[in-house]
Amino acid sequence: MWEPTLIAQTANTVIATLASLVLNGYVTYRILTNHNNLTNYQNLLVGQAALYIFGSVICLVANERMNLQMEYMVGYPFVTLNYAAEVSIKCLLDDTQIAQECLLMIFNVHRVLIFLRQAVTVLFGLL
């Protein structure tokens, strides 16, 4: 049940989640406490950090892993999930990862527009 690779994978998941929560929580805290009115750029940063916090928690709950026999597993060995719960967690995890990628793409386009043309950034913010 608890083989060394499973222990290492679980520990890695917990450590990565804690690091993500601390880093993104700190970014959000600093932006929100230092600024009363947020710019579009700061709103994107706060939104991205909040989405990453949510995604980190979902990754911790899902505990996706693959063992040395290339078997894909979701969940923890000490918690049994029914099929509907497992599928729901997988869908939520996939949707969260897609949302993170889309927000990262929007963030990068916004950053390029800031450097190229400041006036276009306002129109992009309205979208």
Image (cartoon, rainbow, N blue to C red):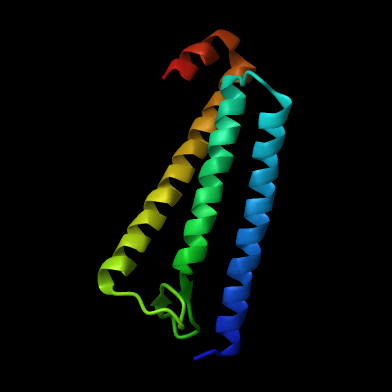
Residue 58: x and y in percent read 47, 58
In percent of the image, x 48 and y 69: which residue is there?
Answer: 63
Quadrant of res 56: bottom right
Residue 91: x and y in percent read 33, 57
Tag count: 0
Query: Does residue 107 appear left or right of residue 96 in this picture?
Result: right
Query: Does residue 43 appear left or right of residue 27 in this picture?
Result: left
Residue 7: x and y in percent read 59, 82
Task: State whether residue 111 appears in this view.
Answer: no
In percent of the image, x 70 and y 43: which residue is there?
Answer: 26
Q: Does 67 sit above or below residue 101?
A: below
Q: Does 33 sit above or below residue 11?
A: above
The residue at the far top in this view is: 119
In percent of the image, x 58 and y 76: which residue is there?
Answer: 9
Residue 69: x and y in percent read 45, 85
Q: Does 82 sit above or below residue 101?
A: below
Image quarter of the C terminus: top left
Viewer-side residue, 119 vs 8: 8
Viewer-side residue, 7 vs 98: 7
The residue at the far left in this view is: 84
Viewer-side residue, 52 vs 104: 52
Task: State whether residue 122 appears in this view.
Answer: yes
Quadrant of res 14: bottom right
Q: Does 110 sit above or below residue 95?
A: above
